[in-house]
Amino acid sequence: MPSLTGQVALVTGASRGIGAALAVELARRGAQCVLVARTQGGLEETDDAIRAAGGLPATLLPLDLQKRAQDIDMLGPSIVARFGRLDILVHAAGVLPKLTPVAHIQPRDMEESLAVNFSAAWRLIRTCDPPLRAAPAGRAVVLTDAVAEAPAAYWGLYGAAKAGMDHLVRCWAAEVATTPLRVNLADPGPVATGLRANAFPGQDPARLARPEDVAPALADLCEASEARHGATIRVAAQAAR
Ligand code: NAP
């Protein structure tokens, strides 16, 4: 029996990139996935890939984590009402509006970065904490970036929000340390996605890891056997299965 059979996973950023590949991997391992992103077509493509991999049909929740932030608050209770449990939270949604000097950051770009890269994590923790604590082996994986711990010129818009998110996640991990819930940050390293192409338009994506190359190691963090907690895990890419 696949290792995550019977478990329910909420995955944000599931319309493309790393979140989509990770959702497919979790479904391949037997999880019932609830997929969140803005783009309905992208969510449907991920669901198609899940079905092709032999997974259970996913539940699609088109949601803008910035413009409909308050709707995040209903995710935990709605999932419990529908499935009776929530075992896994993956927060892979992220946005890199642009690389720019701190002195040139525009208010609307900062609002977007703070909403998606920081506040969404807070709201997800708020709504998912009760069912994740109640799960036999609750697991939360939040996607971060090395730049959060290594400030670099022009990366402040994205990196400061990620650094704040990381702090929040580590505090949450400390708060649930005595429960079965394991909470970790994961840095996937350079991966060929839309976000990466925005940051490095001249970089050849063929020389980078693909989302499906990092998905198995990220999915391992969602397994009941994962004992690490409150850590920032630098994920090593491996050839896709
Ligand atoms: P990506 O391909 O650009 O995907 C980003 C995902 O976030 C998409 O599914 C997008 O869906 C969703 N998203 C963005 N804004 C949203 C919003 N307002 N509401 C709801 N969903 C939203 O990026 P990725 O490279 O896979 O990144 C995944 C995570 O890994 C991010 O947290 C990123 O910071 C992190 N990371 C990536 C790299 C890398 O090299 N790729 C390196 C380090 C860390 P919609 O557009 O459909 O809403």
Image (cartoon, grey):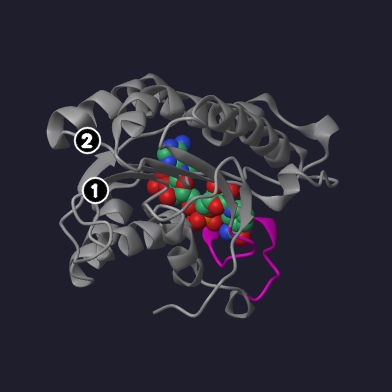
Query: Taken as a whole, is the magenta stretch helix, strand or loop?
Result: loop
In what element is the residue under mark 2? Answer: loop
For label 1, being within 8 Å of ligand 1 is answered no
Residue position for label 2: 85
Viewed as shown, does residue 202 lie left or right of 194? Answer: right
Viewed as shown, does residue 89 lie left or right of 182? Answer: left
68 over 201 or under it: above or below: above
List x then y, in percent, for residue 40.
28, 47
Quadrant for the C terminus in the image: bottom left
- Packing grade of label 2 (10 A; few <14, some 14-19, many >=20) is many
Range shown magenta: 188-204
Q: Residue at x 75, y 32 (%)?
A: 105
Q: Is residue 94 magenta?
A: no
List x then y, in percent, for residue 56.
16, 58
86 over 21 or under it: above or below: above
Of label 2 and label 1, which has the lower sequence position? 1
Q: State the mark number for residue 7.
A: 1
Q: Amino acid at mark 1?
A: Gln
Say which of 82 and 119 sits in front.
82
- Packing grade of label 1 (10 A; few <14, some 14-19, many >=20) is many
Distance of label 2 from label 1 (alpha carbons): 8 Å
List x then y, in percent, for residue 108.
62, 27
Q: Residue at x 40, y 37 (%)?
A: 180
| Contact between labelled residues 1 and 2, with CB atoms less than 8 Å apart | yes
Viewed as shown, does residue 114 lie left or right of 61? Answer: right
